[in-house]
Image: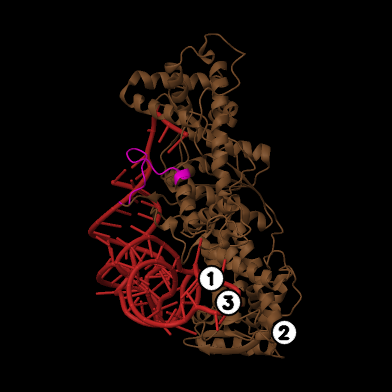
Chain colours: A brown, B red
Amino acid sequence: MKNLTAHLNTTLSEAFANAGLETTHAAVVPSGRPELADYQCNGALALAKPMGKNPRELAETILAELKKADTEGAMFAELSIAGPGFINIKLSDAFLASHAHGLLTSPTLGFPRTEKPDTIILDYAGPNMGKPMHVGHLRPTIIGESLKRMLNFAGHNAQGDVHFGDWGMPMGMIIAELEHDHPEWPFFEEGKTEGFPTESPIDIDEIGAIYRKAAARGKEDEDVRRKARLTAAALQEEHPGYIALWKLLRGVSFESAKKNFLRLNATFELWLGESDVRQMLAPMIDELKDKKIAELDDGAIIIRFDEEKKMPPALIEKSDGGYTYATTDLATIKLRTEDYGTNRIIYIVDRRQSLHFQQVFESARMADYANYELTHAAIGTINGPDGTPLKSREGAPPKLDDLLNAAIDKAREKLPEVGSEKAEGFTQEDLDQLATEIGVATIKFQDLHNNRNTEYIFDLEQFSRFEGKTGPYLQYSVARINSIFEKAGLDVANKGAPIKVTHASERNLILSIANFTDALNRSIERYEPSALCEQVYTVAQKFSAFYNDCPILSTEDEAVKASRLTLAALTRAHQLVCLDLLGIAAPHKMLTR
RNA sequence: GCACCCGUAGCUCAGGUGGAUAGAGCAUCUGCCUUCUAAGCAGGUGGUCGCGGGUUCGAAUCCUGCCGGGUGCGCCA
């Protein structure tokens, strides 16, 4: 099943070619004036200028070719030229109906899967040991997850790597602080190389508290900082006790992060971290020095870039021998190329890291670690009410858990009590589950629908809003359809009946669904889930109008009734695919008080 | 100082790569629940697209200069 715009574009290309015109501008876009047309082609306008011709005349020629191609009038209901030379296209009801029916049998809703799959690693979330996940982790996590799903849907082999922040100075700080507080622990026993405890001595909250304490003390006291550096260096040298302790703390942090990800419906194929490249770092730096890419400068090892790049050098080894995240990120690229056969990497990371990634990407090219596309899909910062990024200094950013709980609680308030008439058949667990699905959807959609690269103001109220352009509105569109089929005692999967267009709302619904392929393509090309958010929301709107205007079960005419059921089933399929690509749950039923 | 991003309705944001009358949600006002879930639908109010030049048939979109905000720039990650 070819998608609608591709079909139209092909038809236009042929018409352009037959008219002796270049076909680069032979493309349709949804009409800006829906009351006049379904689609429009602006190609005549674009061509007229370089050719020195009258755009309306060009449009006439193209129009004549289009009419010739559609001899039986099966495709177009109306073709016309408007304004300076727009070609307005209105499709026939029959053509639209058969197209819609065809979509039902396509598992990808007409989206063409790629013939050249890439092996892609998406690097997102990046939680840090010692720091509980906060609202700043929300965007990279859910945008990365969504992009990964889209790329796989498109036929690629995409994997998510959590890229845990589990190496470097913070580890030194935490371990040094623990040694300061608990020198008697076996991990710190001089010369001990084995027989360390196998259970972590502290839990996730304590790790966070220790880290904060270490940071605070380090700020005041140079000795504390030096001890942390030495400890980090010793860890880097594989000090057995430190390594043993670090592994336990890391395990605890993993478990904590996994809980967060589970609620967010984010999954990772690879649970790697900065530490996984630690053995590669020293040899890599030697290699870079041999290749004359890296050089010694002021006691540290740096990589310089071409003058015209206008980039400051990247620091890959500090004067104390410690490594930086530029070092681990560069080594990680090497690792992915060598061990994972990667031929595309996408980093879904805060845009403030932009220079860092430019430096790392350029370094990787210079060292020939990756002769493929490296992309930093930059994420806009979440700002406080003052318009500057939420800072961790004073007024720590809200914890992710707290934000999720707040939205879930708000969602629960709208649900009926267990045992009440309206909650018939629902257990307390069912209701909790439903509240979670609705609350999390609210947060995810609120976040995903914003442009990836623009900052936005964090407003708790917006995250607990359920009306209008929100996650629950989308879920509601699906639940209503489920309810219709349930009431009718029919199987939603039944896709037999042909579609008949009898009302403008049916037409609009079909047209909005037909836009799926373009919307998904835009999301994939631009690494921008908001395009698909717009799509799923528009379809929900068109469905709501259809739902109001076109009664289904009470319709006398059996053919119309069957057609509307088919349309409802198609809508449902579309919404389920979109919501899944966005990582948003679609509850079977939405209860109300 | 160098580099990047942004300025669109009262608020939060879109705007498919230069096209027709700049769109949504929230807020506000008006209608619609003995008919498939009102977390809904239909409609109204609300904008010199920061300001000035330029490019052209045509600019929120491209170029340029201001004004105003944000971010980043070797020993944190």
* Secondary structure mainly formed by the magenta segment: loop
Question: On the rendered image, what quadrant is the N terminus of chain A found in?
Answer: bottom right
Amino acid under disc 2: Ala
How many circles with numbers are drawn on the protein?
A: 3
Q: Which sits in the foreground, A500 or A378? A: A500
Amino acid under disc 3: Tyr
Q: Label 3 marks which chain's residue? A: A
Mark number, residue A538:
1
Q: Both on one chain, marks 1 and 3?
A: yes
- Identify the image quadrant of residue A111: bottom right
Q: Earlier in the sequence, mark 2 or mark 3?
A: 3
Secondary structure state at the residue bearing disc 3: helix
Give the crowd class for mark 3: few <14, some 14-19, many >=20 residues within 10 Å: some
What's the distance in space between the residues labelled 2 and 3, CA to CA?
Answer: 17 Å
Q: Earlier in the sequence, mark 2 or mark 1?
A: 1
Q: Is residue A77 above or below residue A133?
A: below
Mark number, residue A362:
none
Give the crowd class for mark 1: few <14, some 14-19, many >=20 residues within 10 Å: some
Which residue is tagged 2?
A: A559
Give the crowd class for mark 2: few <14, some 14-19, many >=20 residues within 10 Å: some
Which residue is tagged 3?
A: A547
Q: Position of residue B45 (x, y in %)?
A: 32, 79
The residue mark sitting in front, 2 or 1, is: 2
Q: Is residue A572 above or below residue B20?
A: above
Residue A401, magenta (yes or no) = yes
Observer able to see residue A303? no
Q: Which residues are magenta?
A: A386-402
